[in-house]
Image: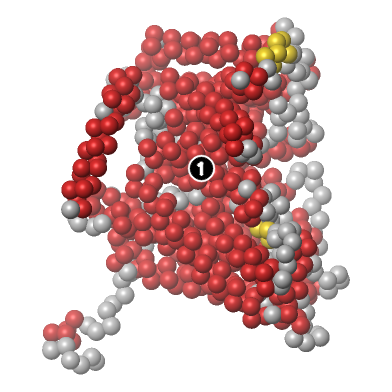
Amino acid sequence: MVDFLARPALDTILLGSLYTMMALGLTLTYKVTKIPNFAHAEYVTIGAYATVVMVNRFGFVGVAGVLAVVVSFLAAAGVALGVDELVFKPLFRRGASPLHMLVASIGAGLVLRYIVFIGADLGNLLSEKANLSAKTVWVIGNGSVSTLHLTIVPTVAGIVIVLHVLFVGTRVGKGMRAMASNFDLARVSGINTTFIRRLTWILAGGLAGVAGAFWAIHNPVTPELGWRALLWIFAASILAGLTSFYGTIAGGYIVAAAENFGISLLNRAYGVDVGYKPMIALAIIVAVFLIRPTGFAGLTVRDVVEGFRSLPSRVRERARRLRASRG
Amino acid sequence: MNERAGSAPPEGETLADLLFLFTSIATIFGIYAILAISLNLEFGYAGQPNLGKVFFYSVGAYVAGILVAHVVSGLAGWSGELFGAPAARVRFEYAVANPGVIFGLFLAALVLGGLAGGAFGYLASFPALRLRGDFLAITLIAVGEVSRVFVHAYEPLAGGAIGILGVPNPFVWITSLGPDIPVTAQRLAYTGVVLGIAVVCLLYAERLSNAPFGRLLKAVRDDELVADVLGKRTRRVKGTVLVIGSAMAAVAGVLYAFHAQSIVAGDYIPQVTFLVLAMVLLGGAANHRGAVIGALVLTLVDRFTQPATLAIAGIFWSSPVDLNYLRYIGIGLMLILVLMFRPEGIIPERPVKTPRPAAPAAAAMDGGTETP
């Protein structure tokens, strides 16, 4: 049992951490600015390339390693801020709807992605691996724990703690939450919405950039890296209704677990081909939107327990109504 | 959309080259025009952002491909693998020998593809009832990707990653009529059919949206609640428009399958939807003529920034920057700039023009027996 479940479990930890890191930024910006940002994935790509360039020039030992991650954070944060200032903010002033914002973000994503393509093409980096590979520390069954696992989990934990403190304990975080729930009210209450909006984009872009840095160590980087992961990021965020902070963390790991455990169990039990794996995350998007568009947001333990307890009576009620309407 | 036409232009004949270029551009334009009109009905008029357009488009293409692959291979007595190159050769030979069969299959594919697209459109109307704009858009993008991944992975359906090869041009027999008929004649005939269908779609959409139904669509888009309160069946309207739009998109897919002569899962990526969306926004949402103009402009941009097209015109792109990258950057910039500076597009939206009834009301008052 352990020997075939170890690998999906370890993949879940690694990919779940990556999805979480990427999705946190998406949730944050959706919540504060109401933009379903399709360009978010490109920030990951930019972060990944920043790390590749840094590592391949300066190495990844000690200060250089920290520097690479910092540069990834700054590069992606800068681009995120720039996109907001140049694209989203002018549209916001014109009162664009979330749908128009989505279309604009698709446009921004196309521009960024192909600028990265041009840069990567000219620099011969179309598929480039950082000169650095995760070392295996420990082998369990068919999986192996690597140094990447050992760094990414504390990183995600650190990010979550910092964000938690930011949202709960600081004025800025309070301002963000205020803007999320009512923009006009936040502004008339004297909250510096411009500053908070900028900070939000810097945080979101930066988190995506750090996720990109880890991708660069995990896999070869291509200009389409972020774009390929985009719907997975959305799946994680959508599980949280695109609004819940803790829901997003759960969402990232749930998406990773569903696809890794799902496909290896299906493969073992029914011989389902691994090629179907991407369908799982995409099916999650569709299913969540159809069943509960708010995702985990506002869901409490009591709701879940109550939901399960009342399930038989609800089914009976539905059946009774159906019979009544027929007969 | 990648061009993988079956017949290469003959060497050294400028006229044939130009005709080849023209038919290729005009066919693609016709297909994109149909897609743009259908998205315009759904998005421009009814406000339903069907960003799964490429899915309905691929439904048509796969219906055509699967139908042709099975029927023609069966009739030709081919019992080997259905989708690969050997089967494709058998199908091309059969199509030359039996013009009636392949043309009939083309018509059948149009009808079946349209029906299948409509059926899937009806299914898509269920999320549309529950979700508002941006969420619906994300859902439909995901639906398109799920189906693409599935077709890519499930080989028995449509050849998996390689796809279906050998969907013959319905007019492939024209060249066998006489010794001096050029290959381009097949393509010209097919281009004519595609443009004809595009015109039919345009007229149909114009008629539909200038009827009271058009006003109803705009009412649902502008304020669903008000339309609901006024007793309009908004759910039914959304369902209807998605069925019509998806059926149109599927017809476009059938036309593309017979044009490209092969169906590859990699062609049906979300970028196609985004391109169509760009056409609608550029031309002007809720305006079919605008959508067609948008389709024309972006098809020309799309085609004339392909190095292969430029080479036919005698221009060789030799900068270190790949032209394809610049094209996508241009499309992205255009989306942003249109939204920012001209959200109403090239041709702004106009009020619905309901045609005057044939018999004036005054005549009906006179007794209603004779018409002037």
Answer left or right for B283 relative to B98: left
- As helix, strand or loop, the secondary structure at mark 1 comes to helix
For image coordinates 29% across by 31% down, the residue present is A311
Return the chain for callout 1: B
Q: Quadrant of the C terminus of chain B?
A: bottom left
For image coordinates 71% across by 7% down, the residue present is A63
Task: Please state which of residues A33 and A229 is positioned toward the viewer in this rendering.
Answer: A229
Q: Quadrant of residue A164?
A: top left
> Looking at the picture, how far across and down is residue B194, in whole percent?
58, 71
Residue B122 lies, with reference to residue A138, above or below; the image says below
Residue B236 lies, with reference to residue A274, above or below; the image says below
Q: Quadrant of residue A129?
A: top right
Residue B325 lies, with reference to residue A188, above or below; the image says below
Task: Please state which of residues A269 and A123 is positioned toward the viewer in this rendering.
Answer: A269
> Looking at the picture, how far across and down is residue A305, in whole percent?
31, 21
Answer left or right for A228 relative to B214: right
> Looking at the picture, how far across and down is residue B315, in whole percent?
79, 59
For image coordinates 67% across by 14% down, the residue present is A140
Give the residue type at disc 1: Ala
Counting the numbered discs, the total is 1
The residue that disc 1 covers is B142
**Residue B315 seen anywhere in this rendered image of the structure:** yes
Q: Quadrant of residue A148?
A: top right
Q: Quadrant of the N terminus of chain B?
A: bottom right
